[in-house]
Image (tube, helix red, strand yellow):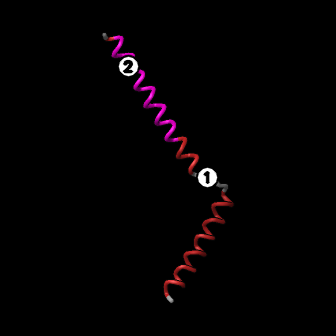
């Protein structure tokens, strides 16, 4: 009986570990790996778009 409970518990731990690992892998795929230059370029484009949006809202 104890061996069965231990087996079920270890299988559950393995499944939970696999689920967590899969969730983290999916999050990493969703986040693009950007170089420093790409981050700077995106930040400047973002700032430019914010300024344009402010001008449009003020009209």
- 41 or 58, nearer to the observer: 58
How would you rate the neighbour count of disc 1 (Cα within 10 Å): few for under 14, some for 14-19, many for 20 or more? few
Q: Residue at x 64, y 64 (%)?
A: 40
Q: Position of residue 50 (x, y in %)?
A: 55, 75
Q: Position of residue 21 (x, y in %)?
A: 50, 36
Q: CA distance from mark 1 to mark 2?
A: 38 Å
Relative to 23, does residue 39 appear above or below in the rendering? Answer: below
The mark found on residue 9 in the picture is: none
How would you rate the neighbour count of disc 2 (Cα within 10 Å): few for under 14, some for 14-19, many for 20 or more? few
Left or right of 58? Residue 45 is right
Left or right of 6? Residue 35 is right
Q: Quadrant of residue 4?
A: top left
Q: For the image shown, how many numbered marks are present on the structure?
A: 2
Q: Residue at x 40, y 25 (%)?
A: 12
What residue span does the magenta drawing correspond to?
3-24
Of mark 1 and mark 2, the one earlier in the sequence is 2
Asked whether residue 22 is drawn in magenta, I would say yes
Asked whether residue 29 is drawn in magenta, I would say no
> Split into 4 quadrants, where in the image is the N terminus?
top left
Q: Residue at x 49, y 31 (%)?
A: 18
The residue that disc 2 covers is 8
> Mainly helix, strand or loop, the magenta region?
helix
The residue that disc 1 covers is 32
């Amino acid at each position: 009986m104890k061996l069965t409970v231990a087996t079920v518990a270890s299988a559950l731990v393995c499944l939970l570990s696999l689920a967590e690992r899969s969730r983290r892998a999916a999050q990493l795929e969703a986040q693009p790996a950007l170089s420093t230059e790409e981050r700077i370029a995106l930040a400047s484009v973002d700032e430019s778009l914010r300024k344009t949006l402010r001008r449009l809202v003020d009209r």
